Image (cartoon, rainbow, N blue to C red):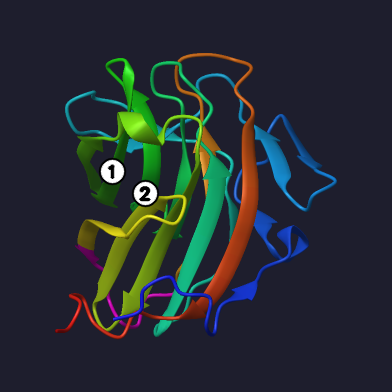
Amino acid sequence: MDAGSNGGNLDVDWAEGRWLHRPVRSEPTLDGGLLVEPGAGSDFWRHTSYGFVHDDGPALLAPLPGGTAVEVDFRLDYTEQFDQAGVLVRVDERNWVKAGVEVSDGQPQVGAVVTREFSDWSVAPVPDWSGRDVTVRVSRAGDALTVRARAGGEPWRLVRVAPLAPDAEATAGPYCCAPSRAGLVVRFTGWRRGPADAALHPSG
């Protein structure tokens, strides 16, 4: 399994995506990146534990058909509670997955929220990823989304395997949210699409 290799992956131009919700500002950088400032209080969440529904974070989305994968790169230089960035996969407002790095309880946590009417959340601390470039990869094959992430050129970490109906029409791309403050600016440095992972687990 060659998850996330450059073979077969093609860059996606930021202009190819459509904003689900427009950010406070988005600004291309001279080196080909994109700065995105989400609004204060923005988030994606449905019901569980917190008792509210938030569906107002900025996300730049393009089609994610079966048999394909999407990768998003960003700089992990944010530090405030619940600051977050990564990949959003969306079918509709009740069915979606967000995966990336969120600051929680004082440190960055890699994780995912899987929502099918109600949200769930899983995280794992990654304090050594602070200040580095992070890549989140979501691969769609059969009835599953497979989420992986890494910092720099380190090996991929399996973050989550989640169900997604093979016939569902989904879109995916970079997202960020700032549930607890104003002024967060996320530096996205890459967006790619390519073939889905050949297998869930490495062979050999």
Q: Amino acid at mark 1?
A: Gly
Asked whether the viewer can see residue 82, the reply is: yes
123 sits left or right of 37 in the view: left
Cα–Cα gap, marks 2 and 1: 6 Å
Q: Amino acid at mark 2?
A: Ala
Q: Quadrant of the C terminus?
A: bottom left
Point out residue 36 in the picture as x, y percentages from the top left corner.
Answer: 67, 36
Could you classify mark 1 by the number of other residues whose Cα lies within 10 Å: few (under 14), some (14-19), or many (20 or more)? many
Seen from the viewer's position, the closer of residues 76 and 80 is: 76
Residue 143, image quadrant = bottom left
* Residue at image mark 1: 111
Residue 26, image quadrant = top right
What residue sits 40% from the left and 83% below the top?
A: 66
- Secondary structure under badge 2? strand
Q: Which mark is residue 45?
A: none
Span of residues in magenta = 162-169
Q: Quadrant of the N terminus?
A: bottom left
What residue sits 36% from the left and 73% below the top?
A: 3
Q: Which mark is residue 99?
A: 2
Point out residue 86 in the picture as x, y percentages from the top left corner.
Answer: 47, 46
Point out residue 19 in the picture as x, y percentages from the top left corner.
Answer: 66, 51
Q: Is residue 167 magenta?
A: yes
What residue sits 45% from the left and 69% below the top?
A: 170
State which tag comes first along the sequence, 2 or 1: 2
Q: How many marks?
A: 2
Seen from the viewer's position, the closer of residues 117 and 3 is: 3
Q: Are marks 2 and 1 in contact (CB under 8 Å)?
A: yes
113 sits left or right of 179 in the view: left
Q: Is residue 108 above or below residue 112?
A: above
Asked whether the viewer can see residue 62, the reply is: no
